[in-house]
Every structure is written in structure tokens, then in C-alpha cells.
Image (tube, helix red, strand yellow):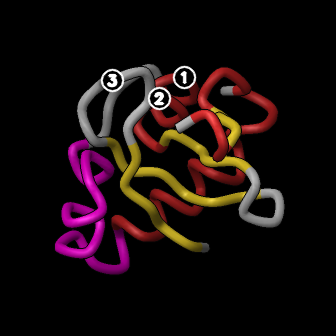
Amino acid sequence: MKLVTFTHKGGKPRAGALVEGDAKIVDLQTAHAAQWKQPADSLASVLAIAEGGVAALDKAYETVKGSAAKAGDAILARKDV
């Protein structure tokens, strides 16, 4: 999993993960909130994920795995960010 920092429509920087051959980005906070109905501080930035260690990386991975089924609006085309 490749982690990225991105902005969308002039918003603040967000943590994401590249998917589908690096053509799309999963917005990790949006996807986590859609799946578990709450934000995750450990996914607030790529730095927060790095500082959170294995637990934060596992949370990011689980968020990406469930994003297609439960958080389709959290998946953005890379060319649009």
C-alpha cells in the first residue's frame, strides 16, 4: 500500500492510499468515517500513520479493504486531486 498526502478542491491536506494501479486515491478519513461512523486520529495524516506504527498502518489497510463496498465516495480519481 502506498500512502500519499493530497488535497481535493482546495481543501486541507489529507492522508490517502493509492489503489487500482495508482489511478485512484482512497481518502482514509472519509472512508473510515463511512465504514465505522467515526473519524480516526491515527489516519489524520501520513505522519500520524507513521507515528502510530503497526496499529495505524493496519487500520489504514482495513479501511482501504472496505472502502469499495462501504465508502465509494471516499475513492477519488488521482487526476482530480
Residues rendered magenta in the picture: 41-55
Amino acid type, callout 1: Ala
CB contact under 8 Å: marks 1 and 2 = yes
Distance from disc 2 to disc 3, alpha carbons, whole Å, reads 16 Å
Give the distance between the C-alpha atoms of the residues marked 3 and 1, in whole angstroms. Answer: 22 Å
Sequence-first disc among 2 and 3: 3
What residue would you read off at disc 2?
30
- Residue 26, by quadrant, is top right
Horizontal side, residue 56 vs residue 20: left or right: left
Above or below, comparing residue 26 to residue 12 in the picture? below
> What amino acid type is highlighted by mark number 3?
Gly
Query: x%, y% of residue 9?
Result: 42, 21
Which structural element holds mark 3? loop
Q: Which residue is mark 3?
A: 10
> Of the numbered discs in the image, which one, if any, rests on residue 34?
1
15 or 80: nearer the viewer: 80
Q: Secondary structure at mark 2?
A: helix
* Residue at 21%, 44% in the rendered image: 41
Q: Residues within 10 Å of mark 1 (few under 14, many from 20)?
A: some
If you read the primary sequence from the N terminus, does the residue marked by circle 3 or circle 1 appear first?
3
Structural distance between the alpha carbons of marks 1 and 2: 6 Å
Above or below residue 80? Residue 58 is below
